[in-house]
Each structure stands twice: as C-alpha cells, then as structure tokens.
Amino acid sequence: MRSLDLNGCRVTTPRAEGSARLLGAVVFDGVALTLDEMTAIRKLYGFKREGPTPKPEPPEAPKREDFAQDWEYRDAVHAYESALKHHENWEDPRALLQAGSDRNAIRHAKADGLRILAWLAKNVPAGDDPLKSVIQLAIDAGWDVDPSDIEWAEGA
C-alpha cells in the first residue's frame, strides 16, 4: 500500500493532496489536513474558530493622595509603569488559543480514528488502504462522496 504524501506528511486522498498544495495544510504528527478537513473536524467535535480578544483597558495611574507613605506611592508608580509597558506590548492570544483548541480536536480525532481502524482491521485485507474501504462504505450508504475520491477508491 503506497500512502499519499505531501512533503513527507500523509494526506487523505489525491484531491486533498492537491488542495493542500494550493491552499495550505494543517500538520499534526505527520498527517497533513486540508483547511476544509480541519474545519470539518472542529465542527464534528464542537470546537469553533477562536475570535479576536479585545485589548484590555490600560492601567490606571496611581494618585498620590491615595497613599499615606511615600514608599507606598513609589511602589505603586513602579507597578503602574511595569503594567503600562506590558499593556503597550500586548498581543492578541488568539493564535495560541486556536492552536490549543485544534490540538484538543485532533486528540479526539486520533482516539476515534484508532477505534474505527480497530474495527475495520477485521474486515480490510492486509495491505489495503483502510480509507478506500471507508469510501466504499460511504458510497454504498448513499453519502455524497466527491467523484475524484470515488475514482481513487475504486482505482488500482
């Protein structure tokens, strides 16, 4: 069984390989998923695209009259200046939040993938691509399968 390849990463179908070459892919543990495939996985497991995080309000400067001791005021000013510097350098954590969300979605997909393959292994001949068997099952079930995937699954 020859696996489909995109720069050393496995892909699902020849159509997905072409799509990933044109539009890019998301890679997890040596498997390249098209953007459409990743969106479908997110949807399947109830994960959503992370939205932008609004920038927090800038810190409020301390007022001298709020402090009885001079050293307390100096400490508050120092803390304010530090907080202001962090506020100026603030970056939206959206990319990190999305990466974590995608990683969790992939964890679910891996677990389900192993469950499905364990079940399929009893019926798929040794050396055959199990995905081709799944595509055949989808065709037989009357699902709307991409014609290029049908051609690939039924081909040699």
Image (cartoon, rainbow, N blue to C red):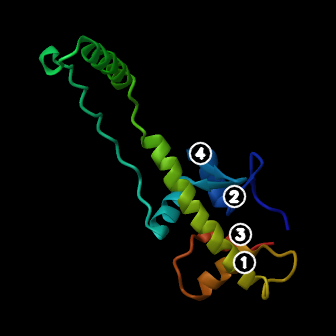
| Residue hosting label 4 | 22
Question: Residues under labels 1 and 2: Cα distance?
Answer: 16 Å
In this rendering, the label closer to the viewer, 1 or 2: 1
Tell me how far mark 2 sits from mark 3, CA to CA. 13 Å
Q: Which residue is mark 1?
A: 117
User: Could you say which is closer to the camera, residue 45 or residue 93?
Assistant: 93
The 10 Å Cα crowd at callout 2, few under 14, some 14 to 19, many 20 or more, is many
Front of the two marks 3 and 1? 1
Mark 4–mark 1 Cα distance, whole angstroms, equals 29 Å
Mark 1 packing: few (<14 Cα in 10 Å), some, or many (20+)? some
Give coordinates of residue 47: x percent, y percent.
44, 61
Q: Of the residues shown, which amino acid type is indicated by label 1?
A: Leu
- Label 4 sits on a secondary structure element that is helix
Image spot of residue 95 (x, y percent): 47, 41
Mark 2 vs 3: CB contact within 8 A: no
Image location of residue 11, percent across then percent down: 69, 58
The tag on residue 11 is 2
> Which circle's residue, 4 or 3, is located before the other in the chain?
4
Tell me where residue 154 appears, x and y as whole percent: 73, 77
Q: Which residue is mark 3?
A: 152
Q: Amino acid at mark 3?
A: Trp
Q: Nearer the viewer, mark 2 or mark 3?
A: 2
- For the C terminus, the quadrant is bottom right
Amino acid type of the residue that numbered disc 2 sits on in the rendered structure = Val
Q: Is residue 1 left or right of residue 138?
A: right
